[in-house]
Image (cartoon, helix red, strand yellow):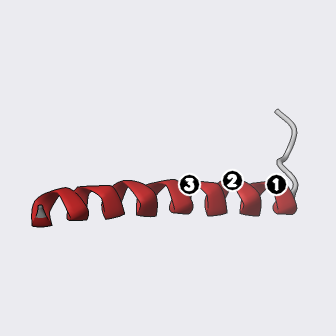
Amino acid sequence: MKEILPEAKKQIVVESIKGVFLLAKENIQDLFN
């Protein structure tokens, strides 16, 4: 397996974190409704 380039790895991490935050935000909004 080829090593993932640092740039690509960083991008994947950023996208993952963004997705987690979006899910968390939706869940928090549901709790307060």
Secondary element at tag 3: helix
Viewer-side residue, 21 vs 1: 21
Are there few (<14), some (14-19), or many (20+) residues within 10 Å of tag 3?
few
Give how far across and how far down residue 22 sits, in percent.
43, 58
Q: Which residue is drawn at 74% across and 63% down?
A: 10
Left or right of 31, for residue 23 = right
Task: Name the residue that disc number 2 marks.
Answer: 12
Q: Does label 1 or label 3 sit earlier along the sequence? A: 1
Viewer-side residue, 21 vs 2: 21
Q: What residue type is labelled 1?
A: Ala
Left or right of 10, for residue 22 = left
Above or below for 12 versus 32: above
- Residue 32 numbered mark, or none: none
Secondary element at tag 2: helix
Q: Distance between the residues labelled 1 and 3?
A: 12 Å
Looking at the rendered image, the quarter that the N terminus falls into is top right
Q: How far apart are marks 2 and 1 (CA)?
A: 6 Å
Q: What residue type is labelled 2?
A: Ile
Check whether the beta carbons of the residues at disc 2 and disc 3 lie within 8 A of each other. Answer: yes
The total number of labels drawn is: 3
Task: Name the residue that disc number 1 marks.
Answer: 8
Q: Which amino acid does label 3 sit on?
A: Ser
Q: Distance between the residues labelled 2 and 3?
A: 6 Å
Give how far across and how far down residue 31 sits, in percent.
12, 61
Task: Name the residue that disc number 3 marks.
Answer: 16
